[in-house]
Amino acid sequence: GSVYACGWNNDGQLGLGDTWDRSKLKQVELPEGKQVYDVHCCYGNRTIAVMTDGSVYACGWNDAGRLGLGDTRSRSKLEQVELPEGKQVLCNLNEWNTSVHALCTAKVKESV
């Protein structure tokens, strides 16, 4: 399905490719060939999207590397988080935690 976003966007957490706040819904461009399974907004300034294939994408404020992208640069578009080899996310257990904790506590399964 499609994902739409609106609201506060000072860190790019809406995933729209910029940092402009939105008062109307705008469609988020998903990575090619990907379909969203679940989306989690973490403390209002980070977004984690789990795709139907178990891959994970993140955008928004990346203080202390909380997006899991290997650096501390914030992102305004969804960018893939590299999971440990042979692992994929099944679901996120706690949407109220910070993104790094939410990813660490996500259920993972071995790839077949």
Image (cartoon, grey):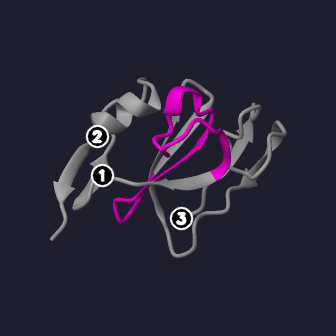
25 displayed left or right of 71: right
111 displayed left or right of 82: left
2 vs 3, front mark: 2
Tell which circle, 1 or 2, labels the residue nearer the N-terminal end.
1
Camera-side residue: 91 or 61?
61
Camera-side residue: 24 or 107?
107
Q: Is residue 64 magenta?
A: yes
Tell me if mark 2 has few (under 14), some (14-19) or many (20+) residues whose alpha carbon lies within 10 angstroms of its own: some
Q: Which residue bears the numbered disc 1?
A: 89
Compared with residue 67, is residue 1 higher up or lower down, i.e. above or below? Answer: below
At label 2, the amino acid type is Ala
Q: Which residue bears the numbered disc 3?
A: 1
* Callout 3: SS: loop
What range is drawn magenta here?
50-77
Q: In x, y percent, where is residue 25?
A: 76, 47
Tell me if mark 1 has few (under 14), some (14-19) or many (20+) residues whose alpha carbon lies within 10 angstroms of its own: many
Which image quadrant for residue 2?
bottom right
Determine whether label 1 and label 3 are within 8 Å by CB. no
Question: The C terminus appears in which quarter of the rendering?
Answer: bottom left
Q: Which residue bears the numbered disc 2?
A: 106
Determine whether label 1 and label 2 are within 8 Å by CB. yes
Measure how far apart labels 2 and 3 are at the Cα level: 22 Å
At label 1, the amino acid type is Val
